[in-house]
Image (cartoon, helix red, strand yellow):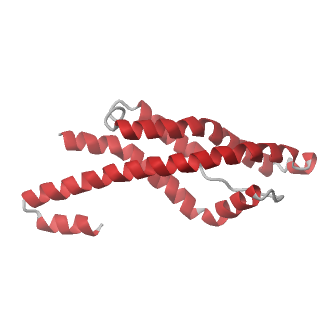
Amino acid sequence: SNAQSRETALNPYLEATNDYNHNIVTFNFAIAPSLDSLRKGERKEYIFLPDFEKLKDTLEKARSDPKVAGVYPDIDAAADDLLAILKDLAPLAAKMEAYYSANTYLTDNYAQSDEMVAQFFPLYDKFGAAYDKFSAIVTDHFEEIRLAEIDTMRKEGRVNAVTFLELT
């Protein structure tokens, strides 16, 4: 059915936001102080950044899936905006993490770190705005699907299922 294919098309996007949000919440104790210190220009021995690479991979997969592409043009466009930023942000974040894990700052007195941080935050801030927009659009469509499901169940007289769905 059309409802089914719309749900199938939304799932990879939903998964992408759920995974990314879960990563941020789970590792917030390490991510938040890292970002905060780097933004302030403080010297760190260790940094922990969000998993941009995984988000990039998930979105690229979704965009190239024929069952996904074209079903939600607004999500596709928001995903493309996000990917345009992630193609620079993800490798830069990986490079920064590698620089710190290899203790390279000991040999160059943070020179490379300062350079990377200067590139990182303009991208990261653009990412934040683009991600929020993407996530909001995905959530809107998810709620649309849920409301349609509830409506269908009501019409079919499946009251218990409706009650359960409305609670979740």
Q: Residue at x 48, y 41 (%)?
A: 58
Where 142 falls versus 90 (above or below)?
below
Where 106 falls versus 27 (above or below)?
above
Q: Residue at x 48, y 53 (%)?
A: 19
Rendering coords of residue 75 (x, y %):
39, 41
Query: As rendered, which of 54 and 152 lies closer to the eye?
Result: 152
Rendering coords of residue 113 (x, y %):
81, 47
Q: Quadrant of the C terminus?
A: bottom left
Along the horizontal axis of the image, is 46 left or right of 149? right
Along the horizontal axis of the image, is 97 left or right of 14? right
Where 135 falls versus 162 (above or below)?
above
Rendering coords of residue 93 (x, y %):
68, 45
Along the horizontal axis of the image, is 57 left or right of 96? left
Rendering coords of residue 124 (x, y %):
63, 48
Q: Residue at x 73, y 49 (%)?
A: 97
Residue 155 picture quarter: bottom left
Q: Quadrant of the N terminus?
A: top left
Residue 39 picture quarter: bottom right
Along the horizontal axis of the image, is 149 left or right of 25? left
Numbered-mark total = 0
Q: Residue at x 54, y 63 (%)?
A: 25
